[in-house]
Amino acid sequence: MSFLPICQELNSQPLDELIGTQDENAVLRALNKVSLRPEDFMALLSPAAETHLEAMAQEAHKRTVQHFGRTIQLFTPLYLANHCSNHCVYCGFNARNDIPRSQLTMDELLIEARAIAATGMKHLLILTGEAPNKAGVDYLEQALAVLAPIFPSVSIEVFPMDEADYARLIRAGVDGLTIFQETYNPELYAILHPAGPKRDYAYRLEAPDRGCRAGMRVVNLGGLLGLDDWRRESFLTGMHAAHLLHAYPGVDIAVSLPRMRPHTGEFQPAYVVEDQHLVQIMMALRLFLPRLSITISTREAPAFRDNIVPLGVTRMSAGVTTAVGGHTKGNETAQFEISDSRSADEMCAALKARGYQPVFKDWESISGSPRPEAAR
């Protein structure tokens, strides 16, 4: 079973009311449990939990160290193209936005890859706009022929695909999939995606299931915080992750918590997600799903990222640019503005100063032999 029917059932319920009416007793019951149920997760996301954030923080830290130790996996994104056929009203790559469009050639990609590898980064996330007619599976396969010999782990954040295409990219060297639903509210989703293939809510929602079935090692999901009520969106995100953890126990399931950032265009977030809200979401997820990987991106300010590391974070990006070829060409047309521009070395120093170990590489291919340049 995919998450679609589960999500439809959840969306038929008055989630805002159910979360909003949780009381202090429900919060305390959740904090005293080892294994939490969905109603406990609701309680930890509720307004009633706001007076118990310190207790949540202590428990979230304990469970994170228990399952992940004091380690933070580092990765960096590489934007291959910014062509897009979608009209997402909140995105700088929106097809209607008048921005310079570009796509890396394989020679340009090799230059970018070598520049990133020189920083020590080994986990790479490659991104494109959603334009399969320009940067489709064939193009991605060519890019992987360049990247796979250099990086032991390559994830994709591109357009949703059929299971067969995910399997094809896995054979080419992909081991991870990131795909955000943006919002789990189907009515709002239709408003925010007025045109383009991304308008298909159900096809996108089922992409993580297809990626898991195809054999992805890591599947990362999430909503774009600020588009809808954050409590409701976070509950549905957690339920999506819980479904995947149960259905595919051999896959590393992860959640990212991106907040809206300034970008090309006029769209402004409808909901403000304050720092304490983001912290509450992260800690509630950690207590509900102790084995869940949690990513905090460079959308967040350096000091804030550093301070929340002990509360549930397991993955962080470093040396980030959101422009095509930005690692060597500059940051002229970025998808959105970042807040934390620190290099890989600077991130390592910050993590070590707080007693955490930055991890550049945490797995080896099943053959046991590294790819030609992976060990450099």
Image (spheres, helix red, strand yellow):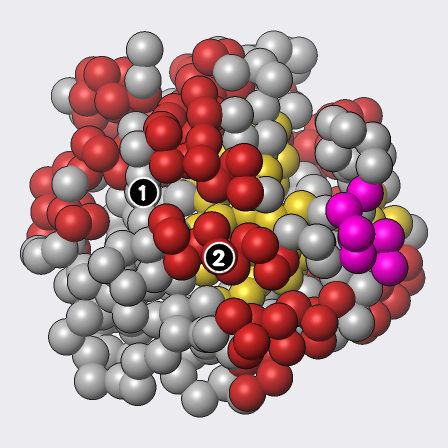
Give the vertical position of 341 relative to 121 (above or below).
below
Instruction: Measure the alpha-carbon separation of dots 1 and 2.
Output: 18 Å
Count the numbered circles shown: 2
Residue type, numbered disc 1: Pro
Task: Check if residue 327 falls in the magenta segment.
Answer: no
Snapshot quadrant of residue 81: bottom left
Of residues 22 and 266, the one nearer the viewer is 266
Task: Please report the bounds of the magenta region as a residue range.
Answer: 370-376
Residue 155 appears in view: yes
What is the x, y in percent for residue 219? 51, 34
What is the x, y in percent for residue 12? 15, 21
Closer mark to the observer between disc 1 and disc 2: 2
- Find disc 1 in the rendering and name its residue: 160
Question: Which secondary structure, mark 1?
Answer: loop
Residue in the image at 22% along x and 16% along y: 5
What is the x, y in percent for residue 84? 25, 65
Residue in the image at 62% along x and 71% along y: 110
- Find disc 2 in the rendering and name its residue: 142
Residue type, numbered disc 2: Gln
Q: Residues within 10 Å of mark 2 (few under 14, many from 20)?
A: few
